[in-house]
Image (cartoon, grey):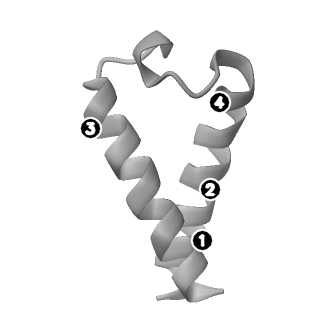
């Protein structure tokens, strides 16, 4: 479980770094994933991260 949370924390940290550059509008992000999917995944990872703290 610790490894999973470490991965979640790393992914959230990377997404938040991109948010600082590109803003909260996931449509403007340089990625191949559907912006709604990316936003949903980010929000679910944040919930998991906050639920574990």
Cα distance in 3D space between marks 1 and 2: 6 Å
Q: Is residue 40 above or below residue 18?
A: below
Q: Position of residue 9 (x, y in %)?
A: 61, 63
Q: Nearer the viewer, mark 1 or mark 3?
A: 3
Judging by the rendered image, the residue that carries numbered circle 1 is 6
Viewer-proximal residue, 3 or 34?
34
Tell me the element at label 4: helix
Label 3 close to label 4 by CB (< 8 Å)? no
Q: Cβ–Cβ below 8 Å for labels 4 and 2?
A: no
- Distance CA(mark 4)–CA(mark 2): 14 Å
In this rendering, the answer to whether 39 lies above or below 53 is: above
**Secondary structure of the residue carrying numbered label 3:** helix
Give how far across and how far down residue 43 sits, in percent. Answer: 44, 54
Q: Which numbered mark, 1 or 4, is in the foreground of this view?
A: 4
Where is mark 2, residue-wise? 10
Considering only order in the chain, which callout, 2 or 4, is on the residue closer to the N terminus?
2
Q: Residue drawn at (33%, 26%), measured in percent from left and top? A: 35
Contact between marks 1 and 2 (CB within 8 A): the answer is yes
Q: CA distance from mark 1 to mark 4?
A: 20 Å
What is the crowding at mark 2: few (fewer than 14 residues within 10 Å), some, or many (at least 20)?
few
Distance from label 3 to label 4 (Cα)? 15 Å
Residue under the image location 60 percent in, 71 percent down:
6
Q: Secondary structure at mark 2?
A: helix
Q: Which residue is mark 3?
A: 37
């Amino acid at each position: 479980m610790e490894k999973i949370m470490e991965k979640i924390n790393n992914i959230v940290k990377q997404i938040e770094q991109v948010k600082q550059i590109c803003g909260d509008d996931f449509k403007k992000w340089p990625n191949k994933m559907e912006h709604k999917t990316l936003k949903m995944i980010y929000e679910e990872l944040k919930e998991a991260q906050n639920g574990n703290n």
